[in-house]
Image (cartoon, rainbow, N blue to C red):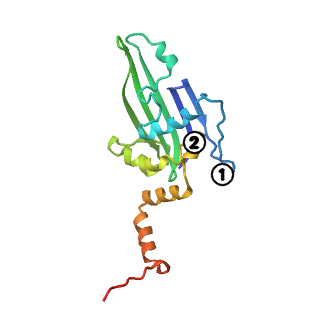
Amino acid sequence: MLLRSIKLKNFRQYKGIQNMTFSSDNQQNVTVILGDNTSGKTTLVQAFNWTLYGTSTFTTKDFLLNMDVSREMDIGDNETVEVEICLNHDNTEYIITRTQEYTCDYKGVRPNKSDIKVSYKESDGQIETIRKSVIDSTINKILPSDLSNYFFFDGERIGNISSKQDVAESVKGLLGLAALDNTMKHLDPSKKKLCYRKI
């Protein structure tokens, strides 16, 4: 998977439409994001999780609309939170977009159900939309949700990864190699235990 760009609209700190392009150069392919505390670095990471899997770890995870936009809404107004990710996977360019509408009524501003759309670009440049029934499986082929925690994490969470062994075990499990690994350990002749039987 190669991330190409992300576009955020009214997502938490990101008021209005904000675009970010990531380096996809073969030699210089690292994008560094720096900023003061509360400037939106963690929000950017959470935008990926929300777009791909519909989840976030914010304390107000059910309310993602920018607070300034929310305060400016009157009864009857609607606003949209949207994040669009462009990426390449297996020589295919994908566009993944999640949106969530917010409505203001006499009870305040409330979120509606989020919606996701996944498209890909054909070799002739035509955009094809993936059926709703296969969106989850398509995203999990690109990046399984169980593995996303090792790709999308901020600097504050680095200390929570206890060891490389944890990562290795997770990857083996996701790839279905855990059973094979256990079998190989069991059959390792250098670790065979002697069995004694009482006569």
Q: Which residue is mark 2?
A: 4
Comparing 106 with 161, the one in front is: 161
Residue 189 in sight = yes
What x and y, as percent, mark residue 127? Answer: 45, 40
Question: Quadrant of residue 173 in the image?
Answer: bottom left
Up the image or down, 99 lies above or below 135; here it is: above
Position of 172 with respect to 103 (left or right) is right
What x and y, as percent, mark residue 155? Answer: 60, 41
Residue lying at the far front of the rendered structure: 199
Categorize mark 1 by other alpha carbons within 10 Å: few (<14), some (14-19), many (20+).
Answer: few
Instruction: Name the kind of residue labelled 2 in the image.
Output: Arg
Q: Residue at x 64, y 37 (%)?
A: 33
Q: Which residue is mark 1?
A: 26
What x and y, as percent, mark residue 110? Answer: 38, 20
Residue 96 in sight = no
Q: Residue at x 42, y 40 (%)?
A: 53
Question: Quadrant of residue 50 in the image?
Answer: top left
Q: Residue at x 58, y 46 (%)?
A: 159
Instruction: Name the kind of residue labelled 1 in the image.
Output: Asn
Position of 148 with respect to 114 (left or right) is right
Q: Earlier in the sequence, mark 1 or mark 2?
A: 2
Question: Quadrant of residue 195 in the image?
Answer: bottom left
Q: Quadrant of the C terminus?
A: bottom left
Under circle 2, the secondary element is strand
Q: Residue at x 65, y 51 (%)?
A: 26
